[in-house]
Amino acid sequence: MFPFLGFGLGLRNKHFKEILATTPKVDWFEAITENYLGLSDTSASDSIEELLKIRQNYPICLHGVSLSIGSADALNANYLKKWKSLIDIIEPEWVSDHLCWTGVLTKNSHDLLPLPYTKEAIANTVTKIKQVQDFLGRRILMENVSSYVEASFSEMNEAEFLAEVCNQADCGILLDLNNIFVSSYNHGFDPETYLDKIPWQRVGQVHLAGPTDKGSHMIDTHDQPVREETWKLYQSMLRRYKPITTMIEWDDKIPPLTELIGHLDVARRFVNQGVVLAP
Ligand SMILES: [Fe+2]
């Protein structure tokens, strides 16, 4: 469903000038949708002109954080219109957001909140993903979020929920392996059993990141190197399927670009070493 773009990084404005000046060895970049929408409730500050200049040398994907696809609220028409206009300008390879809810009654919590894994939530979310895809005229990717609590009335596990939503909505999956690790640690499940349930042909992109270890739980801070457990999941993914477009997310205490590229090269090496046993 989605081409292999190679190994990318999250586009962060502290690196803009260096990227434009040096054209570093990164295959593609992921830009945060909301940074370019000019919405009043976000700190939209990144320059679309700079993004277009970077676009001349790199494929770009757009990654959103406030679609709130799982909310019981109707979709935000204003958000969708602005998103579509941005897509028309940037012409991204694909667009993604999270399988979660971020607020209710038009209030944005700015948190990616986990859904109850129920048939009712599947029906609501599938309907809304289809509406988004019809409006944008393209398939979107939904990302699994990390979580710290679960609804006591869930009827299935998270991986089954993710697979069912994406199969029914006919959308793609952005699989965040760090989020799987964080949630598996916090809730005490085996992350390999999560990978067992994934419809791999739908996975267009992988996120890697590093959480903060609090001992009793992991916090999804995106300010640390990718952990050994997550690299193991990456290798497991390669054994199960084939190389999937990969990206490292680093959102706080952002290191120099060269250091990020060094982390990305670990993923490159895993793929190039041929851990691949594609079906
Ligand atoms: Fe992610």
Image (cartoon, helix red, strand yellow):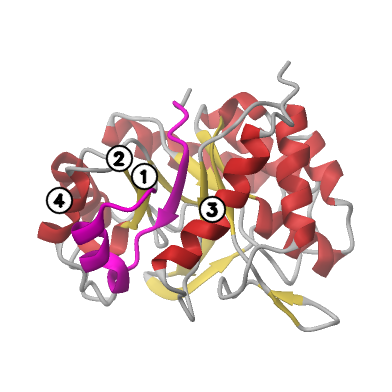
In the rendered image of this protein, does residue 180 appear above or below residue 187?
above
Considering only order in the chain, which callout, 2 or 4, is on the residue closer to the N terminus?
A: 4
Mark 2 lies on residue = 59
Q: Residue at x 85, y 81 (%)?
A: 216
Identified by mark 3, the residue type is: Leu
Numbered disc 2: secondary structure: loop
Q: Which residue lies furthest to the top in this view?
A: 279
Say whether marks 2 and 1 touch (CB < 8 Å): yes
* x and y percentages locating residue 271 in the rendered image: 63, 35
Q: Which residue is drawn at 42% across and 72% down?
A: 256
> How packed is label 4: few (under 14 Cα within 10 Å), some, or many (20 or more)?
some
Marks 3 and 1 sit apart, C-alpha to C-alpha, by 12 Å
- Left or right, residue 156 beside residue 166: right
Numbered disc 4: secondary structure: helix
Q: Can residue 66 be seen in this view?
A: yes
Identified by mark 2, the residue type is: Pro
In the rendered image of this protein, does residue 76 appear above or below residue 132?
below
Say whether marks 3 and 4 touch (CB < 8 Å): no
Magenta span includes 11: yes
Q: Which mark is residue 28?
A: 1
Considering only order in the chain, which callout, 2 or 3, is on the residue closer to the N terminus?
A: 2
Magenta span includes 146: no
Q: In which quarter of the image is residue 201?
A: top right
In the rendered image of this protein, does residue 187 appear above or below residue 53?
below
Q: Which mark is residue 264?
A: 3
Marks 4 and 1 sit apart, C-alpha to C-alpha, by 13 Å
Considering only order in the chain, which callout, 4 or 3, is on the residue closer to the N terminus?
A: 4
Mark 4 lies on residue = 52
Identified by mark 4, the residue type is: Leu
